[in-house]
Amino acid sequence: MVQQSSTTDEVIVETRGHAGLIRLNRPKAINSLNQAMVSGMKAGLDAFARDAAITCVILSGEGERGLCAGGDVRQIHAMKSAGEMDRTRFWRDEFPLNDTISHYPKPYIALMDGIVMGGGVGISSHGRYRIVTERTRLAMPETAIGYFPDVGATWLLPRAPGEVGCWLGLTGREIGAADAIYAGLADYHVASHRLPELVHALAKVSFAADIGAVIEGFSSRPEENGFLCFHRSEIDTAFGFDTVDDIIDALASTKSDFARETLKALHSRSPTSLKLTLLLLRLGRESSGLVECLEREFVAGCAVLRNHDFYEGVRAALIDKDRQPSWRPDTLAQVSDAQLDRYFVATEPPLFRDHRL
């Protein structure tokens, strides 16, 4: 029996047995997050945390295409002429939600079926139980739109094996279930057709300590072979450098198909985004925790919205869809250290109380 607790047009929050369900409901936009959805998720999580009858929370996405394609960057793009407080309001709500998920007091279970990108990773991979399927297509594709991996990705990606996280963050390439688990962004593989059955079983669990065993009972090995594991040596060799120029030189000196495809991806990305992303990933490796990374990402994001590449990248990818962005600067050599320094100067109050980089 399902008892509905609250519903908005774009987020459905309801209870089923002992489970709290949060269903993203913008299927035509592959459940891309907007501010109302973030607020709806937060309200649902707060209510479920207080409800003693709720044992776990399950996140899923409506429609056939995926859990969540990321934040609604069209919405941010449309606010180009607004004041900085208004332009950054979405992140002011989204990033604290990512942190809330990371230490949620009850088992938080993300069903990462289909497309899971950008902000979709943020509301999934910080959770306690991350479940992928044979349909999962996960990516942090931000460098392709003049941005960088955020939502705490600069905390998650540096903790992937070797330089796998660096490859994911710089190239923005998609990975499947086996690779998501290998990279530490997911925990279990469950066949997509079994997800309704899994939700039904979880709703019957009255003790949080039993959640893991129930998920284990539904889990199976991914059918596809892992791309990242297969190419791990090449990834570590090329992406172990601390400058994008050195990474590109290392790839250029290798004649493999992997190197050629990787170079092709990097050459299409914003040069500024590539350099900024690598800096953020290296800083994330040495950070004290998720909050420090989220604060740093927020500062960098504010600066991104004061510059050209994000608006140009969104235009080329999502508005005009000509796939021909004109980056400024358009070469790595033109992106100076002084230009990058501006992305680390805070101009807004911190997101988290008593915390400043």
Image (cartoon, helix red, strand yellow):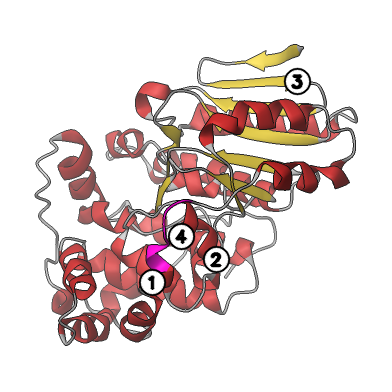
Distance (Cα) linking label 1 and label 3:
41 Å
Q: Which mark is residue 230?
A: 1
For mark 4, what is the residue?
A: 179
Distance (Cα) linking label 2 and label 3:
33 Å
For mark 2, what is the residue?
A: 155
For mark 3, what is the residue?
A: 16
Q: Indicate which label's residue lies in the foreground, 1 or 3.
A: 1
Q: Are marks 2 and 3 in contact (CB under 8 Å)?
A: no
Quadrant into which the C terminus falls: bottom right
Say whether disc 2 or disc 3 marks the residue closer to the N-terminus: 3
Q: Quadrant of residue 342?
A: bottom left
Q: Indicate which label's residue lies in the foreground, 2 or 3.
A: 3
Q: Indicate which label's residue lies in the foreground, 4 or 3.
A: 4
Instruction: Give neighbour class at mark 2: few <14, some 14-19, many 20+ (Cα, 10 Å).
Output: many
173 or 199: nearer the eye?
Answer: 199
Quadrant into which the N terminus falls: top right
Query: Which span is picked out in magenta?
Result: 223-228
Residue shown at the point (32%, 58%) measured from the top left? 172
Distance (Cα) linking label 4 and label 2:
18 Å
Q: Which mark is residue 55?
A: none
Instruction: Give neighbour class at mark 1: few <14, some 14-19, many 20+ (Cα, 10 Å).
Output: few
